Each structure stands twice: as structure tokens, then as C-alpha cells.
Image: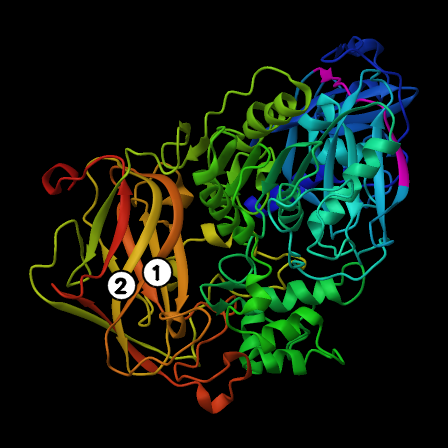
Amino acid sequence: MTRRRVAVLGLCFALLFSTSKTLRLAPLAQGAVLQQAPAAAATQLDALSGEYTDPNEPDTRISFYVQDGKLVMESERMVPTPLTENSPNEFAVPETKMTLKFTLDSAGRGASMFAANDPQVIFKHTGDAVHHSFHDYQRSEIMIPMRDGIKLHTVILKPVDITTPLPFLVQRTPYGVDGTSRASFFGGRPELARAGYIYVAQDIRGRYKSEGEFVMSRPQVDHHPGSPRTGLGPGGGHDPKAIDETTDTYDTVDWLLKNVQGNNGRAGFVGTSYPGFLAMEAGIDPHPAVKAISPQAPMIDVWMGDDFFHNGAFRQSYGYDYVFGMESNKENADVSYGKDKDGKPEDGFDYFLARGSFAEDVKKSGVKQPFPTWKLFLDHPSYDTVWSSRGVEHHLNAVTVPTLSVGGYYDQEDMWGPQEEYKMLEPHDSKNENFLVLGPWRHGSWGSSSRHLGNLNYGESIGKEFRAQIEAKFFGHYLKDEPGFDLEDTASFQTGSNTWKRYSHFPPKEAQPTSLHLVGDGLLSWTDAKEPAKTSYESDPANPVPYRHRPIQPTYGNGSQWFNWLTEDQRFVTDRKDVAVWKLPVLKKDLIVTGEVLADIFASTTGTDNDMIVKLIDQYPDDDPDPKMRGYQLMTNEQIFRGRYLDSFEKPTPLRAGSIHEYRYSLRDVDHVFKAGHTVMVEIQSTWFPLYDRNPQTFVPNIMTAKPEDYKPATITIYSDSDHDSNLQVPLMNACDHIECF
């Protein structure tokens, strides 16, 4: 049902990235209500006028009204768009494949509306049509020269209806800017578009219409901190023409200031995911005109915790799919896993299992030569200088400009980046200009106005609240000197209680790390194990644990369930024999967990390598008021660690079979209330396929090139005793006495 709802929300976004020149309509006052004519006098089009709302998503209202003889559609984030009439009650959305159908009430007036391709989600008539304000952004294109002569394709949107000087708001991206328009700006960032900026979107080197060579997560050049700056900005070491993303950013700002009239001398940067990484780059040796940046889900280090590796474990399906899409050509390519014997799309689980290692994935991909980043995976599986040179965190030694980092607790791609970015900058934040916002979002979903994430319902549009109350005011304050930005340090939407919290630091000082012990008989305890205990399971690479429900589609393919997998009900794997489970008794009172959760697990293996996957889970009661959440097992924290890197990420070493090793690592941040009546669970397993490649469980120099005979079953044993206290360090905001809580 959620999937269908998200599809229909596409109705609101269908026009957002259109390159068409939308018909400009006569302006109305902001918030003006378009009164309908009396029913008796209403024309066929007038009868359809009004505001329509999906009851499940009340924050995504769409208005229809008649202007210049046409039925026009608009919303808070959709510019007025005349529709094409197919029949009295059916209309086509121009330059899309979408058709809208209306039903009438007994009086002949519009009662509901739905998209023909998704008739189960119905928008109800809820009132008179409302007109919103939309600045008249005029579009221009330019090739901006960089210091080495390369020119970058840039689109500039300038609001000609605003006469006062305005700051630049810049997004640099590898995903193409040809579709940047007035419609796409309001569609993607409605609050910022309505606030009024000179919006700049730029293709980075080697992508789409920009010149030069594309390099994934381009390494930093030597900036010599503290060295004199010239008019050209960062010197790139001793070579004045040495380039990276920071120098291209500097040169772009310098050109804009000198060549775009009507600017106020300030620039801000914003972006999500790869553009989030590029926004952070704007804060490293920044141009003096850069006054604010908001890196959102930035890919800070793609080996340590973002995108391609997590603690040394390779993200096989994602690394394959993303690089194929990015490096097949200068634009984006689609990924296919082919067809199975019945002619249906191949399940990604079977696709990658049949091939085995990543080297075989590349060999059988049909690509003549491995893409550059595939080759990096194959040749550099450990954290050497190839990866550390791309790690942005190594350069975050000063808060050079006000920085608003944004991340999601359910970000399936770059959860680590914003948390690490904030953590690295915080010790240097002498001016209180390092800010953090965290919420229960998937990758980039703070851009949505939905109240839902997967099966979860938060009861309010937290994305809309963030954009209006924090993001827009952040840029307004630092780029326009506007009042209203009052965030002290961190804002977090706390799940469970479903309320916004503000903290003077994250994690808050009130959070007390408390040991949650994995004891015998599948139990969790706040006290040390009274008796030594062991829990064992056999992990078989030939039968790995799927990371989400099957079938598994290409990451960004049609019908992909990639986006919400971190919120999936874990009952689909809990009963497997290769998943170990521990539980607390049912809670009698709320348990508030805010901050970083650490796993500290003592384990042995009969093999010579191993993956450790630890999941903290909130199990809902069987009588939960929401029927679809009854008995639901929701992950709040989860992470993997590859055993060969216990001693060093740079130099992998084999594990000695049968010896006990300590796996101590972060499960990332959380802000969650385990409600009374819920159950706290911990699960441990050693495969998570095919998102993470299978560990052969016998040590090989390079898992990327492991042979079929290298993959062998192994028995994993978790220890709980006085010398090997397997536990999770849980940051409790309220102490949990055994009698009081259980």
C-alpha cells in the first residue's frame, strides 16, 4: 500500500524536473482562494475546480482551477500547469504519461480525482482551490571556465520579479542539470525557491555537458592549510592549476560574483548524496563569499561507512549497480539482471549468488574493460591511500563556514557521512556554527512531504517541518541576514515518541552509555551474566541471509524496494538457524535511547575470516493499534564489520580458528523510544546478501577474487562470561531498573 501511495505522490512530482517551458499564467495573490461559481452556472471545467487531498497524505494537496479556458493544476511545489482535456472528466498532464480522472458527486461537481495508472489511491475534494506564489525564474546556461581551462556546464535561474540583490544558492552534481527549471526548483526545494535566490546548478567535471574527466569521489589535492590565498583561491599545493572539487567550487563562485548581476556577494551550497559531498567540499578552503553550506547525506568516506564499503565489507549489489549506472557513459545507464528461465526479471539474490565473487560479476557484466571504480574495488579492497585520499573527514579540521549537516536514521546509502561530518567538526566549533539535523528518513526523503516511511506513520510531515523551520531559515539567516534561525546545535526527530527534540550537543550529555548484556538462553540483561554462556550458529556462504525481502530488483530499477529496506519487518529472517537472537522481557515503561550505540561482541569462528552483523530491534506488541505493525520487528541500529580488519583497516590479517576475538564498533546514532509493551531485541548473523558480498570464511588475500572452493561453512560462537562480556553500549536517557522496567 505504501508503495502505491509513493507512486501516486509522483503525481505531485511528475512535472518537477520537466525541461518544458511551462505556460505562464496571470499571477494571483499568495494564498488567494479561487472561488467557484454556483453549481447551477458552473461549466464542465468549473465543476472540477477545487482542492483535492489524499487522506493518507494530507500535506500533499493539489488544486485545480480554470484559467484562460483550461483546467490548471498546481500545488505548493508544482507550478501552475494547464492540462490537456481528453474528455470532460479525463485530462492528460503535458509531457508525461500521466492521465487524471475525476468523479462527480450527485450535484455534478468534482468529488474525487485519481491517476489512471493507480486508481486505488484517491484524492478527495476538500475545499476551494488555493493559489500559491511562484517567483518568475528566468533560465540561462553558461560554460564556466576553471583554472585549468576546462569549462563546466552551468544553469542559472534568476527571479526577475525580485529587484533587490540576492545571494547565490548553488548545487553541483554528477546527475545532470539540463532539467533544471523554475518547475524543478519549486518541485525539489519549494521553501527555498519561494524565498528567492539566484539558483545555480552545475554539472561537475566529465559529467553530462561539462568538459574534463569524471573521477568518482575525486581525491583532495594538497591545500597547504594556512598558506597565503591568491585571487585564484586554493593553490593546489605547488601547482596553481591542480584541481579538485574544492577548486572547481572556488572558481565557480568567483566567476558568478563577477559575471551575474544583481547578486549580494554571498553564496550558499546545498546538495544531497553525491551533491552533499560536493556541498561539503565548498567548505574546505572556501571562497570568501561562501557563507553557508548544507551537506545532506554527504558521501564523506565511501570505504569507511558510505556507499561502497562499511567497515571493510564490500556492498556488492550497490557497488555493481551504482558504478554501472554512473560510468557506462557521461550520463546515466540502466542496470538489468536479465531474465530467469520463466522470462521474469532475475532475482538479484540469485544473480549475484550464481556469479560468486565481484571479479566474476565484472567478468560476466558484458563490459569490455572494467569501469574505473570497479577496478578500484578489485585492486584496492583495503583502506589504502586510494580510499583515504577520498576521505573528506581527514580535511575537516575547521568550521570555515556555518554548516548544516542533515542525515536520516534510515538512510540506506549515506547514513554515516553526516554523523561523521558533524563529529569531526564539533571540536573546532568555537563560533557555534556546526549544526546537525537527524530524522527517521531514508536517503534524501526530507525533501518529501509524506508522513510515512515504508510501513511507519509519523503523524506529521517531518520533511516539510525541517525544510520550513530549519533549512530555509538557516540559509535566510546566513545569506540574507533574516531573523528566525534559532537552532542551537542539533535537531532530531525522536522516533517512538514521534516528537522533535533539540539538543545543545549530540549525543546529549544526559545520555548515559549503559551495557546491555547478551546472556544465556537468548536473553538480554542490564546486569552481567551470572553464568558463562555460549550461543552458536552455522554460517553457510552457499545459503546467505538476504538483507531484504526477495525478489531483489536492481537498486534503482523499476519496482525496486531498495529505498525502504532498513524499515522492513525482520521477522522474515528471525527464525533462521544462522541468526542468533536475544531479547529483554516486555517493557513496562518507555526506554529512551539517544546517541551512539556501540557493539562489543566476543566471538570465535571455525574459519579464518568472518563478518559480524549486529542489529538492535524494536519488536512491536501483537496488539499494536496499527494492524500492520502488530508483532513488527523494526531495526533501530544495524551495522557490519569484516573480521579481517580487526587489527587494521589497511592490512587485513586472518583470524585464528577457534580463538576469541573482540568486535567493538559503532552501530551509528539513534534517537528512539522503545515504548512500554514493546520488546528490545538483538540479532547477530554473518551474511547480509547481496548488499554485502559473502565472506568466504576462509582467509584469502582479496575477497573480490575469491574462488568457489574458498567459500566454506563456519560455526560462529558468541561468548558471555566475565572475561568475554558480549554487550551493546546503549545511550540511555532514563535508567532502566529491572523491577521498574519489566
Q: Is residue 84 above or below residue 217?
A: above
State which region is magenta. 128-141
Residue annotated with mark 1 = 614
| Residue 535 screen position, x and y as percent | 21, 70
Q: Is residue 706 above or below residue 480?
A: below
Image coloring type: rainbow
Locate residue 636 relative to residue 291 in the image: left or right.
left
| Residue 518 screen position, x and y as percent | 20, 59
* Residue 594 figure quarter: top left
Residue annotated with mark 2 = 601
| Residue 648 screen position, x and y as percent | 40, 70
Q: Point out the image quarter for the C terminus.
A: top left
The numbered mark, 2 or 1, whose residue comes first in the sequence reads 2
Q: CA distance from mark 2 to mark 1?
A: 9 Å
Q: Point out the image quarter for the N terminus.
A: top right
**Picture residue at 71% right of the left edge, 29% below the top:** 77
